[in-house]
Image: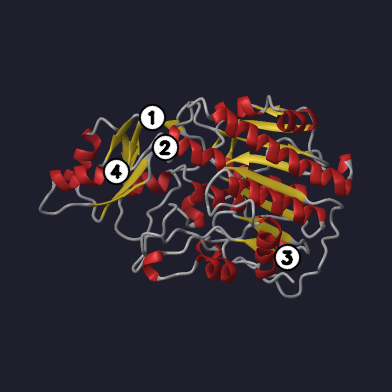
């Protein structure tokens, strides 16, 4: 029995015959997609579906802000998730924006559930504790607090789903290591589809992003990761075909952000402590960007702007204009790194990273869709990540008035 179902929702969604599966491939930039589209599963998707190329991510281009945008259609300033980490009084080093409660506003997942759909979310960022039909949460225990990983997952997800996943597929997994974790969660996704347990399935795969962080997007080994990702997409297409026939494949493959090689690493925190030893600023380093506070000091800003690794420095007014926000109180500066530079601790291995200004040429992602309601053979040369949510809502046939932008122009509904 699956917990987390919203009271009063029907058990089955009667709006569509086959489920819609949304696969988020973390770190899938356009350069990698150009290679992925040459492999069998993606080639078949594009032959039958539509693709929006060069989709511009959010500012900052981090995983949790981007995934909140994918579900809300809003910018980080409006949905409230402006960083991966949770920066509030009492927050510890392991406190990420794991929970649905951190996202302001409505989500496509919630709207679908209210419309009578059974919604599943497998390792989708920011949906721990969501009141959906089937949740396998992305959440990590804090060892310093004595938290138990198994109990944390069970408490923030659907216990029946989590236990079945371990019983059926636990042999695949090696803790949270990749590529085994993506194989494990893909096996669980196919199991849900074959058992016809969901009408909307949100799936987050991290293998490519994990590899790029360690070795960079240009490392030759990335080719093996692309082959693995294509095979996972093929397994999902096969599961949909087995249960609903060739015409029952309803699939979206999308990215959240790209990655860039990081060859010039700067420990910005150590740098600022050395420059201002009597009153060192607080620094939150996120690879391609960093937040600095706690106050809007003109001397700090001048120094930040003088750094060769910094592309530009945003204050509160600039952040507001560009629809981002401050992660809690006391971070009035957002420093954007130039391509090739990264803000990270000196002891951290960084082959590639993200968080950069999404307007950097070529630093874009993708949205690929297949199935009923999608115009086959269409390629759109640009888009905005905020258009994903209204597009998903339209494919589900549910209203989603919160989204300020129109769907991608790939629909035939």
Q: Do labels 3 and 1 touch, CB within 8 Å? A: no
Nearer to the camera, 247 or 158 = 158
Q: Do labels 1 and 2 touch, CB within 8 Å? A: yes
Q: CA distance from mark 1 to mark 2?
A: 8 Å
Q: Which residue is mark 3?
A: 114
Q: Residue at x 47, y 45 (%)?
A: 62
Q: CA distance from mark 4 to mark 3?
A: 47 Å
Instruction: Determine whether 407 is above or below 39 in the image.
Output: below
Q: Which residue is mark 4?
A: 347
Of marks 4 and 3, the one in the foreground: 4
Q: Residue at x 68, y 24 (%)?
A: 38
Q: CA distance from mark 3 to mark 2?
A: 36 Å
Instruction: Determine whether 48 is above or below 197 in the image.
Output: above
Residue 111 % position (x, y):
69, 60
Of marks 3 and 1, the one in the foreground: 1
> Is 409 left, or right, of 178 in this rendering?
right
* Disc 3 residue crowd, few under 14, some 14–19, many 20+, Cα 10 Å: some
For the question of whether residue 404 can be seen, the reply is no
Instruction: Determine whether 136 is above or below 236 in the image.
Output: below
| Marking on residue 208 | none
Q: Which residue is mark 1?
A: 339
């Amino acid at each position: 029995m699956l917990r987390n179902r919203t009271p009063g929702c029907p058990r089955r969604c009667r709006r569509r015959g086959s489920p819609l599966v949304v696969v988020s491939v973390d770190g899938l930039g356009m350069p990698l997609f150009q290679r992925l589209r040459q492999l069998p599963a993606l080639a078949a998707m594009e032959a039958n579906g539509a693709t929006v190329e060069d989709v511009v991510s959010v500012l900052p281009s981090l995983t949790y802000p981007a995934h909140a945008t994918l579900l809300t259609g809003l910018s980080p300033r409006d949905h409230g998730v402006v960083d991966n980490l949770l920066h509030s009084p009492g927050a510890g080093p392991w406190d990420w924006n794991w929970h649905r409660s951190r996202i302001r506003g409505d989500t496509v997942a919630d709207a679908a559930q209210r419309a009578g759909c059974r919604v599943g979310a497998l390792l989708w960022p920011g949906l721990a504790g969501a009141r959906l039909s089937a949740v396998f949460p992305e959440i990590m225990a804090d060892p310093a607090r004595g938290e138990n990983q198994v109990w944390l997952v069970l408490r923030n997800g659907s216990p029946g789903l989590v236990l079945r996943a371990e019983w059926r597929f636990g042999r695949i997994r090696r803790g949270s290591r990749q590529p085994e974790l993506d194989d494990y969660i893909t096996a669980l996704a196919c199991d849900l589809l074959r058992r016809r347990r969901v009408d909307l399935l949100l799936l987050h795969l991290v293998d490519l992003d994990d590899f790029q962080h360690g070795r960079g997007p240009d490392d030759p080994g990335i080719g093996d990761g692309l082959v693995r990702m294509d095979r996972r997409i093929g397994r999902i297409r096969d599961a949909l075909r087995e249960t609903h026939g060739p015409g029952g494949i309803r699939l979206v493959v999308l990215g959240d952000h790209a990655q860039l090689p990081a060859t010039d690493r700067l420990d910005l925190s150590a740098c600022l402590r050395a420059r201002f030893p009597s009153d060192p600023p607080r620094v939150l380093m996120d690879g391609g960007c960093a937040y600095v506070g706690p106050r809007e000091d003109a001397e700090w800003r001048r120094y930040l702007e003088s750094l060769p690794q910094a592309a530009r420095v945003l204050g509160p007014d600039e952040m507001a204009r560009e629809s981002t926000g401050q992660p809690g109180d006391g971070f009035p500066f957002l420093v954007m790194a130039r391509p090739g530079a990264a803000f990270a601790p000196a002891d951290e291995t960084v082959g590639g990273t993200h968080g950069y200004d999404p307007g950097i040429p070529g630093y874009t992602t993708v949205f690929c869709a297949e199935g009923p309601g999608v115009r086959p053979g269409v390629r759109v040369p640009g888009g905005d990540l905020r258009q994903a949510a209204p597009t998903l809502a339209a494919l589900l046939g549910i209203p989603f008035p919160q989204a300020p932008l129109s769907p991608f122009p790939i629909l035939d509904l």
